Image (cartoon, rainbow, N blue to C red):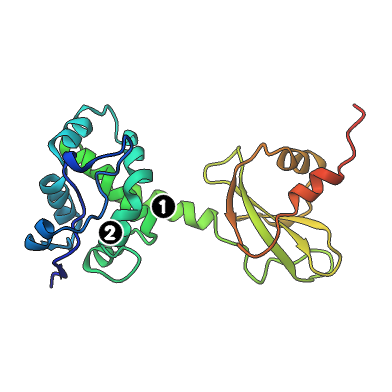
Amino acid sequence: MKIVTATLSLLISISALVAQDADPFAVVESEEQNEKIESIPSTLAEAHEQLEKQLPAEELKKIDAMKAEEDMIDYHFRSGMGIRNTWGLWGDSPLALNMRELGFTHPDDMSSVILETFWCKRHGKDFRIKERAEYYRAYWTENKWPDKEAVDPDDKSEVVWSRGYEAAGRLHRTIYIGRSKKTGRLLAFENPTGVYVPDEKLLESLSNNAHTSRFTSGTTPDPLPELKANRVPRSD
């Protein structure tokens, strides 16, 4: 059963793009749009149909001129939020349920897949749904936040994990940094390695911002700025 709305329209005409970086996927309410009832798509195929109907011709030309689906990343950052919110990907909309059936569990991933496969549709390419679903499954498995079992390996005390950093050397690799609640010492965690004491090289790399912050608890201060401030420069 389709969810119908009289006030939400996912896309706007090119004449309404008043800013240089205006979002063609922005949600705009107007009397004209209120008169045109749009259905929230229930499937990936319907999402593509909706995009083709509502995207301005100029935007479709830009997509058709793109050499690779990765170029759709610009739309992901500009428009992903509009797609996720308007089409109910954060909840249990029919489209969200369909994307979950296809193997995608996070709304960010869903909107990315919708946009990337839309490029594929326009260019006559295979959607590679199973390949994409496996990629995201591996990503979230590798980047799972440390659970209650991730304790200090020496005394089994609780660790307060504060932040995860993207790291090189392995696909999807994220290093989580936290402090022992009992001793205050820094500890690291990786999937599937587990908890370990980070060596000097890793700590120096992290404290020098060589890695990008990827995940945060949102409540626990990042220990690395303090680490960097208190670090004694190496003599070698």
What's the residue type where badge 2 is placed?
Leu
Residue under numbered circle 1: 136
Q: Residue furthest left?
A: 35
> Which quarter of the image is occupied by the N terminus?
bottom left
Q: Residues within 10 Å of mark 1 (few under 14, many from 20)?
A: some
Query: Residue 125 in the image: x percent, y percent?
Result: 20, 36
- In the rendered image, is residue 126 in sight? no
Closest to the observer, 229 or 142: 229
Which image quadrant is residue 144 in? Answer: bottom right
Q: What secondary structure is found at the residue carrying circle 1?
A: helix
Instruction: Give the amino acid at mark 1.
Output: Tyr
Answer above or below: position of 14 versus 156. Answer: above
Residue 77 against residue 148 in the figure, above or below:
above
Circle 2 residues within 10 Å: few <14, some 14–19, many ≥20: some
Q: Which mark is residue 102?
A: 2
Picture quadrant of residue 6:
bottom left
Residue 203, percent from left and from top: 77, 44
Instruction: State which quadrant residue 128 falls in.
Output: top left
